[in-house]
Amino acid sequence: MANHKLIRQLARESGGKIILLVLDGLGGMPFEDYDETALEIANTPVMDRLAREGCLGLSHPIARGVTPGSGPAHLSLFGYDPVQTPVGRGVLSALGIGFDLQSGDIAARGNFCTVDSSGKIVDRRAGRIDSDVSLPLVSKLDKIKIAGAETYVRLVKEYRFMLALRADGLDGRLDDTDPQAIGKAPLPVTALDPAAEKSASLVQTWINAAQIVLKDEQPANMITMRGFGQDPNLPKFDDLYRLRAACVAVYPMYKGVSRLVGMEVLETESHYSPEDEFKVVADNWDDFDFFFVHVKPTDSRGEDGKFLEKAQVIESVDRALPSLLDLKPDVLVITGDHSTPASLRSHSWHPVPTLMWAPDTHLPDRAQTFGEREAQVGGLGQFSAQDLMPMIMGHALRLDKFGA
Amino acid sequence: MANHKLIRQLARESGGKIILLVLDGLGGMPFEDYDETALEIANTPVMDRLAREGCLGLSHPIARGVTPGSGPAHLSLFGYDPVQTPVGRGVLSALGIGFDLQSGDIAARGNFCTVDSSGKIVDRRAGRIDSDVSLPLVSKLDKIKIAGAETYVRLVKEYRFMLALRADGLDGRLDDTDPQAIGKAPLPVTALDPAAEKSASLVQTWINAAQIVLKDEQPANMITMRGFGQDPNLPKFDDLYRLRAACVAVYPMYKGVSRLVGMEVLETESHYSPEDEFKVVADNWDDFDFFFVHVKPTDSRGEDGKFLEKAQVIESVDRALPSLLDLKPDVLVITGDHSTPASLRSHSWHPVPTLMWAPDTHLPDRAQTFGEREAQVGGLGQFSAQDLMPMIMGHALRLDKFGA
């Protein structure tokens, strides 16, 4: 379990420069007739060299057997306990789109949906309308005023939006209104704790107003709300680890979780390749101690069941890696937030292959390539993802000795 | 984390005889042109045989990534949580020199230093004066009387001494007076907790008196104080594990931490070799169930960056090992308290190679030699050093079954 008190006490002001390269959903399984995983079958001469020089291990994102979502998995990678400090999907969405969420605000994810004349849902995503269709609807919702709280509505993407409420004394412990099924009406807002009753009532008032605003729209004539929550006020990287930390990610979600822990989110474009992202690291190399670099398509290809295409994404990262190595990081970790085996077409609980390369401080193991089976016998052993940051800090010579 | 309640409940009155052989700072890294670590390169036919017969693993002294000092690292090896039960350096010093520290006493480490006419420190160690120079000064300090507490001053070594205060209601939560820099005056004693205000005042009174006593001495004309603390009253080995435990160590620090957990400290001379220490074990074999044997120079050679000399120390232990094996211990564990790679010239966070040899009860693994890389794939896996004592107790058949 994360021991922030100890780490904060030991963290030094200075030390090595760190790159944490996260290939989303990196871990996998053999697929159909292939005996190897996507990582194993990928042709990755650079990663294999780093594996030979450094050492491997397997990280467990949450707990053995437990499949994580991306938000909790990244919180673990960053050294926070995602079970003890749950962060609502709404908060991650808000931070991901750059909304200036303030302490105490409630944030939630909204979906446009289609309901029939009796109010029952017939399409939970309103035909997956494009952003240009939903944007004017979001503007209408943003104009709604209710007594007792300021409200903000912002487009996330396509049929998804974010709702934020701002007032004193709000409490984000509210249940989803999405019934997770068609043929049912959206659920009323219910408080998960008595202290959240007032907030439940405010949100219900806003939803009732939204229903009226949307009633003549097609197909987006109603909304469902999910993932209510508030900024958990996590300790920030500069306070906890004394690191000036930067995030290089393309997807809003990962920018959001990075902001939550105090990273500066560097600018990227939605079409950026791994090579483009690495260029952002290079352009900002002197200004930060720690770079979190997030590559999304490994996960997407896994979720689509595209085994060889997942391997190709890994190969594209490998080809771009020399540009990161040219920066001479003191610590380079390559890992995933969780596994996404193409054979399962989903996230999974399998532990995540992790490569620790810190040429001045790593203790080599016998791994010859970067892959799941080599990681199973790697020198890092199996560990909680929450321990990765302390391990990185150690290898960067950024932790004082504990006790004399 | 240590589960003392469970272990105390299960510990048996009888069982196998145990030797815990700790080579300080045993773990290492490859060094310059050598691909092997000091332990791997050392010619250790006896340890290698024990590794073939028994099984290996890696222990984490405090937490992954965290480099321990010797005191906390030994508390972990003995099965205590050093983060939850910190022990001040002063307490370890007091116990190390055999001072009869009583429950409630405050102990601190003192250094003689040199200050200029304005009271600013010009030498934090008073020219590293020899023990024969400091001994008469210690006698003068020991004669100081203050109202409200008895005080005791004892020589530790060279420019270092120990101060103990004895009175009812003392509280050791006091900050160091050593400013850790030259050009600054010693700091006033400050309480780290309001409950320690009275104690802060008593210590300051004593320091003021010491300043007057020393003012005409050269170079030791002032003192600084560090590592204030009190005996944490840890559960003792005979209570917790039902073991009659003995310590064979040369350095005061390790004798001190052994006394803290209730071991009887057997007599040694400062020049003792591993072979001499093993003779002490043999001479006392019938009187104890458990022997903690501490070998210091592995750490010292690592800290000096002397890679091959560290390997030679390990070889000297190996040559002496048959005399321990002749005693027919039921459990022999060879490990370190932490790693001290010669390439880093300091303690490190790398997990510590551990050899468990218990011919009647160990489950052999595939290890062929004793070394870091063999331990990475050893049968004990990677574990918290706090779990080593329960593992030892199990292998010694000294724990009852838990539940029916």
Image: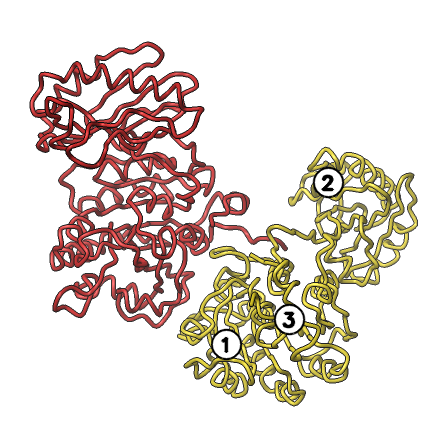
Chain colours: A red, B yellow
Asked if marks 3 and 2 touch (Cβ < 8 Å), the reply is no
Question: Is A296 on the left or on the right of A17, as rendered?
Answer: left
Q: Residues within 10 Å of mark 2 (few under 14, many from 20)?
A: many
Q: Secondary structure at mark 3?
A: loop
Q: Please give the residue where the numbered disc 3 appears in the rendered image.
A: B296
Snapshot quadrant of residue A130:
top left
> What is the quadrant of residue B8 in the picture?
bottom right
- The amino acid marked with disc number 2 is Pro
Q: CA distance from mark 1 to mark 3?
A: 15 Å
Residue B186 - label: 2
Have a look at marks 1 and 2 and say if they share a chain: yes
Q: Quadrant of residue A222?
A: top left
Using the rendered image, report if marks 3 and 2 lie on a common chain: yes
Quadrant of the snapshot with the N terminus of chain B: bottom right
Q: Earlier in the sequence, mark 1 or mark 3?
A: 1
Spatial CA span between label 1 and label 2 = 43 Å
User: How far is the residue under mark 3 from the one under mark 2?
Assistant: 32 Å
Within-10-Å neighbours for mark 3: few <14, some 14–19, many 20+: many
Q: Percent from the top left, x then y, of residue A168?
A: 42, 16
Q: Amino acid at mark 3?
A: Lys
Where residue A198 is drawn, which disc sits there? none
User: Mark 2 or mark 3, which is nearer the start of the sequence?
Assistant: 2
Q: Position of residue A37 (x, y in %)?
A: 20, 64
Q: Which residue is mark 1?
A: B39
